[in-house]
Image (tube, grey):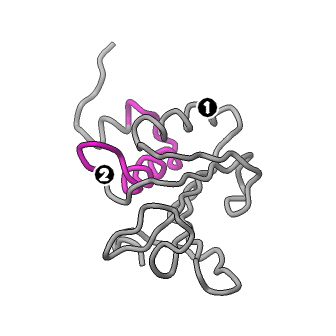
Amino acid sequence: MYHSNLIKSPLTVSPHGSFEVNQLCESVAICEAVKGDRHNWGNATETEPAFVVYLGCRKDEVASHVNTFKTFYRSGMCEVREPKYLKDFEVEIKVRGMQRQSDSHAFGLDYLVESQQWQDFGCDSDEYDYYTTGHQQHW
């Protein structure tokens, strides 16, 4: 169901088969409706079903992640909770309303997965900027 260039690893399927949860990288999972938007997640398109994103992180990272989701991803609702799907983390942030692809108005799921993969590999923000943009900060 998801964009073909991302590897997804199944975590669970709902008892009635109305959604499935797949892990996209170490710290990001996606819960996709099997069809349409029957749960009113608000981001289904004509070709893609609605989805909710789960980000696993440390407790001390929650405030910055929530602020980033609301500011740069334009995501309406973030719920911080005990990990249900990403159990290797202290907390899990459930994010509704994120778009799949980044555009000139907001980051999307594609950017979140890419940036988290770099972070999972131990890459800091300056190194990430260098590898993705070719620009390196000089202090």
**Residue type, label 1:** Ala
The vertical placement of 44 against 126, above or below, is below
Measure the alpha-carbon separation of dots 2 and 1: 22 Å
In this picture, residue 118 sits left or right of residue 17:
left
**Residue type, label 2:** Ser
- Give me the residue at 42% from left, 62% from top: 43
In this picture, residue 104 sits left or right of residue 9:
left
Q: Which residues are magenta?
A: 102-127
The vertical placement of 119 against 18, above or below, is above
On whether residue 71 falls in the magenta region, the answer is no
Q: x, y (%) of residue 130?
A: 30, 35
**Quadrant hosting residue 2:** bottom left
| Element type at mark 1 | helix
On whether residue 108 falls in the magenta region, the answer is yes
| Residue nearer the viewer, 8 or 70 | 70
Q: x, y (%) of residue 76?
A: 50, 46
> Which residue in the rendered view is the most extreme toward the bottom?
16
In this picture, residue 114 sits left or right of residue 121:
left
| Residue nearer the viewer, 104 or 61 | 104
Residue topped by disc 1: 63
Residue topped by disc 2: 102
Q: x, y (%) of residue 25?
A: 52, 60
Q: Residues within 10 Å of mark 2 (few under 14, many from 20)?
A: some
- Give me the residue at 62% from left, 86% from top: 17
**Where does the C terminus fall, quadrant-wise?**
top left
The vertical placement of 68 against 91, above or below, is above
